Image (cartoon, grey):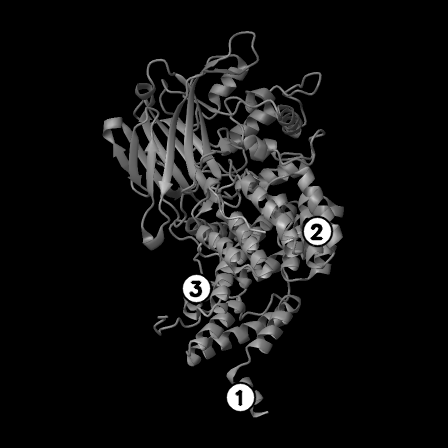
Amino acid sequence: MIPSTIDGREPFTTSGTIAVANLHAQIDGLAARLLRAVPGPAEPGPAEPRPAEPRPAATGPAVTAVAGADWGAFIDLLTLRGQVLGRVADYGWAAAIAEQLVRGGAGGDGTALLARARSRATFHRFADALGDLDAAAARGGADHSVLEAERAVILQATGSYAEAERLHRNAVMDRPGFATLGALAVFQAERGEAAEAEGLFDQARQCYQGISPFPVASLDYRRGLMWHREGNLAAAAVWLGASRDRVPAYAPAVGLLAEIDAAAGANYAAIRRLLPLVSISDDPAYAAGLARALRAVGHHREAGQWHSIAAARYDELVLRHPQAYADHAADFRRLEPSLAERQSGERR
Amino acid sequence: MGDHFSSPRVFGDPAADIADVFVFPRPERPGRVVLVLTVFPSATVTSLFSDALTYRFRIRPVTVAGPGAAPGYAVGEDEYTFDFTFEGDGVGGLAQAGRCVTPGGQEVVFRVGDEMAADSLGLRIYAGARLDPFFIALTGVRETRQLGRLSFKPTDTNANEGQNVLAIVVEADLAAMLGAGAGPLLAVIGETVTSGRHPVRLEHTARAELKNFIMSDKQHDRVNQDIEIRDLFNSEDAFGLAPYYLDAYRARLNANLAFYDGLDGKTDWPTGDRGEHPLTGFLLADFLVIDISKPFAEGTYMEIDRAVLAGRPHSTSGGRPLNDDIVDLLFTLLVGGVDGPHISDGVEQATQPATSGFPYLASPNPDPPPLTPPFALPPVSAQPLES
């Protein structure tokens, strides 16, 4: 089949550069307001230990419950920035807040549990995340359709495709729109049903009525990822490029475009894509990719530096989030042994 | 929170999120009217207007509905708009450029952050970050809504202290600009509308807290307990609501307005046989009404509305001045009736009240929390990268 190309019905969205600047500002502004009103967890840096003793998020049950909803919105923004810029630290901050909200008693109406479910799913703690969704549903307060959408994504990630598909299709029947059609498109894309996924991606795009560029950039990235997995690199490049054009800093798209470049031997192009990426993202995958590309063009000393940075970051992430990063770290070790490890292997 | 965060749909793009709309006569200069639209709650000084939106003021002449009609306004057919659009993404520290299209179709180009006096058109324009003039004892309001009784402290803290917004301010001689047939009563709405080939209204705002206080709570609504109704309402034309969701809006307002009325333990707004609250229809016609023939005064927010509800002539310019305590005025109206005893949330003014000189809103908080990288940056390649 011939994949769709971008037609003239492009969603009209805010400049990706403006949107990223405003996302930073939104997080900073909300953080100032929330931290002043209800002291919560500070932003943890990678060198800092995880908060050992979560503090209550507020005093008084009424304040705590409402503050939980506000923190939930803040968690959503951090997670969005984590996705867009590839910042694992934002995911970690969101997870720490969600954990403290639930432990501090803000889970009374289910919204904090929903937030924790999302953050746990981000770090591949799928069983825990499903438990939180069950608890959130039992307590009420969180939108049923939102809970079901989260459940579908987790079931999909754990290979429970039949149940995930049922939830996705029910959602499309009940509320046809960008979010539900896009979720079903991604589901079909991950299952290798590219033909149906293409139609769904198109339908979802045509339904978009917002002006935020992030949802469209994310959808186009997932479409590009699908074609990359299908081996159609030309189609992949079209949609990854669309994603990157809409949000120039969109890390997943830029990273995969660099991977395609490197696979085609265009290592300098890959390096040019990855250099700005590693300055905004702390995902070691990009540092590892940069190390590979630099090594391929003979810049061994610099490649070694980036390899070390990636290795240290993988070590740290495996300790913090083993379910999410153990496999990636193992792949990194297998595919990208350090210079010392390679020399050792050669001696053997 | 005014109209801050009133639309889940635009939460992902805060530049589309209207915080408040204000309209008032220029102090000391009767005849000139100031329109203010604030967006991007909790903005920083680096926040930017969207380049995919039209920020719009809609103005229509209104008259008080005649004797025998339900309290309210008759809205005229003629409409006048000020449309604002923006370009530029701030890269390199360059300011955004703005464009204002007047009701007469004239264009004024200006730079964000700078005042622009378009003397030939009798306009003054400003757009940029300013201190948010909205103030509220949020904890007291939340506890009141959750506990079902007035829970305000005598004095409390402004939850919005130090927060910035992006503001659009336009000052014009509306009487001259709109012609003799317009006024003295004008209805004003602020909107954010997508700028693409198929414009979509993302938000409309006029009266403060209609969506956040009165429309958002679901638990009292026995008809639709699981609908987030604010997105639907935001997409409506406030000068003429479509019939599709009217019953849902009415059910939500009837339930929640009765809840507010009962906060003092007595009924000041008796409902009809089918539970219709006397304010429901009045508030669903959501626009600010200003009398442009009256001079500026503070404390005039909803004074014209209250006069119409009471069946008496109004005495002020109405509208919404920047420093009015809308939380007190709204709770007083909803809980105690048109002339009920004053209810205070314990916060009487913004930490830095708005000024009497253009652009009226105080300068932005220059010290927002710094944006710090969450990790140490590795060294950047110094080697040439030529293929």
Is residue B343 among what the camera can see?
no
Q: Position of residue B55 (x, y in %)?
A: 42, 35
Q: Position of residue B345 (x, y in %)?
A: 55, 36
Q: Earlier in the sequence, mark 1 or mark 2?
A: 2
In the figure, A273 relative to B210: above or below?
Answer: below
> Do circles 1 and 2 both sit on a common chain?
yes
Q: Earlier in the sequence, mark 3 or mark 1?
A: 3
Q: Position of residue B137 (x, y in %)?
A: 54, 40
Q: Is residue A141 left or right of residue A303?
A: right
Query: Callout 3: helix, strand or loop?
Result: helix
Marks 3/1: CA–CA distance: 30 Å
Please give the residue where the numbered disc 1 appears in the rendered image. Answer: A343
Query: Callout 1: helix, strand or loop?
Result: helix
Q: Nearer the viewer, mark 1 or mark 2?
A: 1
Marks 2/3: CA–CA distance: 35 Å
Please give the residue where the numbered disc 3 appears in the rendered image. Answer: A273
Q: Is residue B95 left or right of residue A293?
A: left
Residue type, label 3: Arg
Is residue B212 among what the camera can see?
yes
Residue type, label 1: Gln
Marks 1/2: CA–CA distance: 47 Å
* Total marks placed: 3
Residue type, label 2: Arg
Identify the residue at the far left of this view: B120
Q: Earlier in the sequence, mark 2 or mark 3?
A: 2
Asked if the residue under mark 1 is in contact with the one under mark 3, i.e. CB atoms within 8 Å, the reply is no
Density class for disc 2 (Cα within 10 Å; few <14, some 14-19, many ≥20) is many
Query: Callout 2: helix, strand or loop?
Result: helix
Q: Nearer the viewer, residue B160 or A313?
A: A313
Q: Chain of mark 3?
A: A
Residue A151: which numbered mark, if any? Answer: 2
Q: Is residue A143 left or right of residue B233?
A: right
